[in-house]
Image: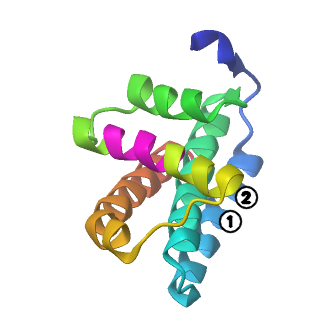
Amino acid sequence: MKEEIFRISKNIVRAKALRDMASERLKDIKNEEKPYKIVEQYYEVIKELITAIMYSEGFKTLSHIALIEYLKENHSKPFNGEEFITLDEIRRLRNDILYYGKKVDDIYLKNKEEKLKAIINKLFEISDSIAF
């Protein structure tokens, strides 16, 4: 997986823009009603925050799997194993939504939403501690 992560110059401006976009997207979720769109948006928030963290530390990847691996290898302390399983699960689910038209029911969202919010809060804390 390390070969999919590239060293780049730190880019705090881009990192902040991604963090701001994630923050805006998170606010917009409140207006969404369809569970599959909410799940998709939570994943986008997570992806943008991890990408922001990577940019602020001088790394980049085009792989969504590598994003999670980077987080696990470099910022695992605030997370537990179950949260990394949830991250990979939502990554796969977002892929199924986007490319195969999979629908998500209310039950999935009710069972996972608090976990996703907790992960997102931890990612905001990490990004705040790095560069913002």
The image shows residue 84 at horizontal and vertical percentages of 34, 38
Kindly identify the residue that appears in the image at 68 percent across and 65 percent down. 21
> Taken as a whole, is the magenta stretch helix, strand or loop?
helix
- Which corner quadrant holds the C terminus? bottom right
Q: Is residue 98 visible?
A: yes
Which stretch did the figure color magenta?
Answer: 84-91
The image shows residue 103 at horizontal and vertical percentages of 54, 66
As drawn, 53 above or below 60: below
Instruction: Decide if residue 127 is on the left or right side of residue 87.
Output: right
As drawn, 125 above or below 10: below
As drawn, 113 above or below 62: below
Residue closer to the observer: 129 or 23: 23
Kind of residue at badge 1: Met
Residue closer to the observer: 13 or 18: 18
User: Which type of secondary structure does the marked residue at label 2 adopt?
Assistant: helix
Classed neighbour count for the residue bearing mark 1: other residues with Cα under 10 Å, few (<14), some (14–19), many (≥20): some
In reply to whether residue 57 is colored magenta, the answer given is: no
Q: How is the image coloured?
A: rainbow
Looking at this view, name the residue that lies furthest to the top: 3
Kind of residue at badge 2: Ala
Kindly identify the residue that appears in the image at 50 percent across and 65 percent down. 39
Residue located beneath label 1 in the image:
21
All told, the count of numbered labels is 2
Residue closer to the observer: 14 or 107: 107
Q: Is residue 132 visible?
A: no
The image shows residue 47 at horizontal and vertical percentages of 59, 48
Kindly identify the residue that appears in the image at 35 percent across and 46 percent down. 86
Which label belongs to residue 17? 2
